[in-house]
């Protein structure tokens, strides 16, 4: 492909620009291309081709140098000081997916974990794939409680778009008929193992308001013809999703939306292209395009289009807007409300309980299910019985399994007898971890730091975010309820925990360019358009007005598809 | 001859060996390790030929570590630690992964085993008859267990050298191809998820 710099202005002019190629950017590309718009996707990171660029996908445990695929501490500390805070993501099998913190630094006023992957596909290759709909209760909560601002949309606005994106992406799950966790268009659910079934029965017998279901996950259990045509197949239960799937069995931009966009003939995919700002034309009150830094040559070039979709992740898109100052927008594009960069949210977790399970020695499983069980929110459902001393709620993810060869290292003994023992699986254990809603707070904020530059010479971000009273009160209940349920199931040696959580660690950053009804208090309108610059849409986590307690990616997909539909219609009507 | 040698072609073996050794050693060194000259073939407790130093461990330390690994996971009716090259694995972990504190603990532990073998039995550790060797190792095992209980609530407590030996031996063994797929059960591509089946349908612990 000719580099952008060597192309004429006409060759750098498109109908639509999509910034970023992760979950949201991939959907924007697919929808805009399928609706006939010549679309360029600008991705700041390197190119990643589906399957061909998953170097570790077929590696076996003995193919790795480090013990269990671990990286040397020195390498982790030098390049991944922050990325490694998850404890599990940066390994020999996955290190090529993560940014190097020494190349892409940020400042922490308080601990903030910004876990990122800069490459085509972004974190859609790396996500945990848990896919849940928001409920009416989630959209109404801010208005009802006087927290933040009201969402400009309700569940009914998004429901058909959830149907649409679920059908294409492929979500496996069990319908439960719960108003606070709406059912979707599901592929067959994955089954529970012996102890999970017991846990489900005992918890549901004892607590009428609680439900234990199988995780709703973006792994195909029965590929549709549409999915097969894209080269996607059914999940083979390797549970190595994060390395990239040779079967295209989990949803990613690379396996699903980008190929769908590509086959229209309308897609131009440009990696190594960091969008540094939006070009704003004060005379028309619209964006005319974006400024791009070629990260390989350091050339700067402008790309033009009628409409711009910002899908660079919550903080990535916010950074682009903050870095787009003009006489009309001295504090960042669309920032009349001063809300840009504020109200950072995530899901707080690292709290729950574990237990040992007696018996079931004659039961086992085959395969590595890339999924666990899910316990939907059961607090503050609107009735007196579920009301607590905090607002909102939390859900649990977890499951049961049998211990393996690792179990005896810390015990006494060695030799032939220990070896014989390790050839059989050990006892069952069970764990559930809570994920809780974080309230929007204007002082939870990211700002542009022009003094500190990244490897490309670009300004960086400063984070100042913490969890507050509501989240701290919720955490006590998250631990107590986890222990209560494991005890109810009859498990033994129940141990609760509440470990240090750094905002961002949930890798669900949200809220920094929120949607709202009033341009004075929000950045985006109900169609994800920047209030004061209507041909710029922001459809990633930045747009979120509140955070719910469920994993957000499915909602970004639905919002993006809805916004793309709006943009195409608005263009046709000559409104953009 | 290590078990794996008979089951894969030579080129594949070299590739794996280079991987195992970090891809930083020459083919000559790789062949040396593969031919078994730095570990004891067939689980013998004396070296068949002159011992070879590793990248971190000296020749003598390598012999002590090999003897211990052999006792921790011996060959039974299935392969053992020495059949899959655990000593070389341990040496590589020490060279590439362990912080200085852990390296020093392990080194001091191996030296102590040698000193105590000579003091109590007037022989090198690796030449001890099996009952004496396991008796000495049981002493270290008890110490390691007591120490880990004592320091359970400390932040980043120093490990006991024998705990390190057991851990490295176990990880090296069960993440090797033979350990994972011949001693335990391993499925690279499991296919359908069977959530709740009788244990007898599987018959062995899954390696992953």
Image: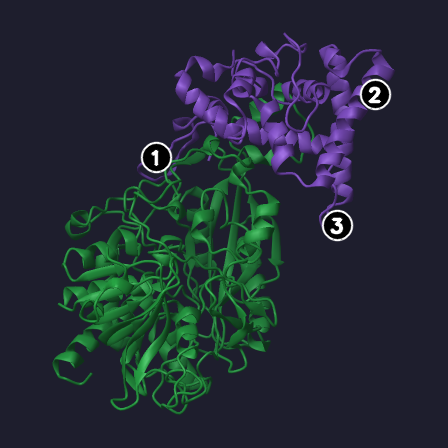
Chain colours: A green, B purple
Q: Residue at x 36, y 81 (%)?
A: A515
- The circle on residue B154 is 3
Where is residue A169 drawn, in percent x and y?
25, 57
Q: Which residue is drawn at 45% across and 46% down?
A: A94
Depth-wise, is mark 1 or mark 2 nearer the camera?
A: 2
Question: What residue sits right under mark 2 in the picture?
Answer: B115
Do the residues at pointers 2 and 3 share their chain? Answer: yes
Do the residues at pointers 1 and 2 share their chain? Answer: yes
Where is residue A439 drawn, in percent x and y?
49, 77
- Residues packed near mark 2 inside 10 Å, few (<14), some (14 to 19) or many (20 plus): some
Above-or-below relation of A281 to A201: below
Task: State how far apart marks 1 and 2 are (Cα).
Answer: 48 Å
Where is residue A110 drawn, in percent x and y?
61, 70
Q: What is the chain identity of the residue bearing mark 3? A: B
Residue sticking out furthest to the right: B119
> To which quarter of the image does residue B13 belong?
top left
Quadrant position of the C terminus of chain A in the picture: bottom left
Secondary structure state at the residue bearing disc 2: helix
CB-based contact (under 8 Å), mark 2 and mark 3: no
Question: What residue sits right under mark 1 in the picture?
Answer: B189
Marks 3 and 1, the one that precedes in the sequence: 3
Viewer-proximal residue, A120 or B201?
A120
């Amino acid at each position: 492909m000719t580099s952008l710099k060597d192309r004429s202005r006409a060759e750098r002019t498109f109908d639509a620009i999509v910034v970023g190629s992760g979950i949201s950017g991939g959907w924007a590309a697919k929808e805009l291309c399928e609706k006939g718009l010549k679309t360029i996707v600008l991705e700041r990171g390197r190119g990643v081709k589906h399957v061909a660029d998953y170097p570790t996908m077929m590696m076996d445990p003995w193919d790795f140098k480090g013990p269990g695929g671990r990286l040397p501490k020195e390498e982790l500390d030098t390049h991944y000081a922050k990325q490694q805070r998850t404890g599990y993501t940066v390994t020999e099998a996955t290190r090529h997916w993560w940014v190097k913190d020494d190349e892409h630094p940020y400042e922490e006023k308080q601990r903030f974990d910004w876990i990122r992957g800069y490459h085509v596909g972004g974190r859609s290759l790396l996500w945990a794939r848990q896919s849940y709909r928001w409920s009416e209760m989630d959209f109404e909560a801010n208005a009802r409680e006087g927290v933040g601002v009201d969402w400009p949309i309700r569940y009914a606005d998004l429901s058909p778009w959830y149907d649409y994106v679920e059908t294409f992406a492929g979500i496996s799950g069990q319908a439960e008929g719960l108003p606070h966790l709406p059912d979707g268009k599901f592929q067959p659910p994955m089954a529970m193992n012996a102890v999970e079934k017991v846990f489900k029965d005992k918890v549901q017998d004892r607590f009428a308001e609680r439900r234990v279901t199988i995780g709703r996950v973006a792994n195909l259990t029965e590929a549709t013809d549409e999915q097969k045509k894209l080269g996607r197949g059914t999940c083979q239960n390797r549970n190595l999703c994060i390395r990239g799937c040779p079967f295209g069995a989990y949803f990613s931009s690379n396996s699903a939306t980008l190929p769908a966009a590509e086959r229209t003939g309308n897609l131009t995919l440009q990696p190594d292209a960091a969008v540094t700002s939006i070009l704003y034309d004060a005379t028309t009150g619209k964006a005319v395009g974006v400024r791009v830094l070629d990260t390989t040559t350091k050339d700067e070039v402008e790309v033009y289009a009628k409409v711009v979709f910002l899908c660079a992740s919550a903080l990535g898109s916010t950074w682009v807007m903050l870095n787009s100052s003009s006489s009309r927008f001295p504090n960042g594009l669309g920032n009349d409300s001063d809300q840009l960069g504020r109200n950072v949210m995530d899901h707080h977790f690292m709290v729950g309980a574990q237990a040992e399970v007696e018996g079931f020695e004659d039961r086992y499983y085959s395969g590595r299910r890339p999924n666990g069980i899910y316990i939907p929110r059961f607090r503050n459902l609107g009735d007196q019985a579920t009301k607590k001393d905090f607002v909102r709620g939390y859900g649990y993810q977890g499951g049961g399994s049998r211990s393996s060869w690792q179990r005896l290292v810390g015990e006494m003994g060695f030799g032939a007898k220990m070896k014989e023992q390790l050839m059989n699986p050990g006892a069952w254990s069970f764990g559930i971890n809570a994920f809780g809603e974080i309230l929007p707070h204007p002082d939870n904020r990211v700002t542009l730091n022009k003094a500190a530059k990244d490897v490309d010479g670009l300004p960086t971000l400063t984070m100042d975010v913490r969890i507050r009273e509501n989240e701290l009160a919720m955490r006590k209940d998250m631990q107590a309820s986890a222990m209560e349920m494991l005890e109810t199931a009859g498990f033994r040696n129940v141990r609760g925990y509440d470990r240090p959580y750094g905002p961002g660690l949930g890798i669900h950053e949200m809220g920094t360019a929120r949607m709202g009804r009033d341009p004075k208090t929000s950045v985006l309108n109900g169609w994800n358009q920047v209030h004061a610059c209507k041909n710029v849409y922001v459809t990633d986590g930045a747009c979120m007005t509140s955070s719910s307690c469920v994993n957000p990616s499915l909602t970004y997909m639905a919002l993006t598809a809805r916004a793309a539909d709006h943009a195409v219609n608005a263009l046709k009507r000559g409104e953009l | 001859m290590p078990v794996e040698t008979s089951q894969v072609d030579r080129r594949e073996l070299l590739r794996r060996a280079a991987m195992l050794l970090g891809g930083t050693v020459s083919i000559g060194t790789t062949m040396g390790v593969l031919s078994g000259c730095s570990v004891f073939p067939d689980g013998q407790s004396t070296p068949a030929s002159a011992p070879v130093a590793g990248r971190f461990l000296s020749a003598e330390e390598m012999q002590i570590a090999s003897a211990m690994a052999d006792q921790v996971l011996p060959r039974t009716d299935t392969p053992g630690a020495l059949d899959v090259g655990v000593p070389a694995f341990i040496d590589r972990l020490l060279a590439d992964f362990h912080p200085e504190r852990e390296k020093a603990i392990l080194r001091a532990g191996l030296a102590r085993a040698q000193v105590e073998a000579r003091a109590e039995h007037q022989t090198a550790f690796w030449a001890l008859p099996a009952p004496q060797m396991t008796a000495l190792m049981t002493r270290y095992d008890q110490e390691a267990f007591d120490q880990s209980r004592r320091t359970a609530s400390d932040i980043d407590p120093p490990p006991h050298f024998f705990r390190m030996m057991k851990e490295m031996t176990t990880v090296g063994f069960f993440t090797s191809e033979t350990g994972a797929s011949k001693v335990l059960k391993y499925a690279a591509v499991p296919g359908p998820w069977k959530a709740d089946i009788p244990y007898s349908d599987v018959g062995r612990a899954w390696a992953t």
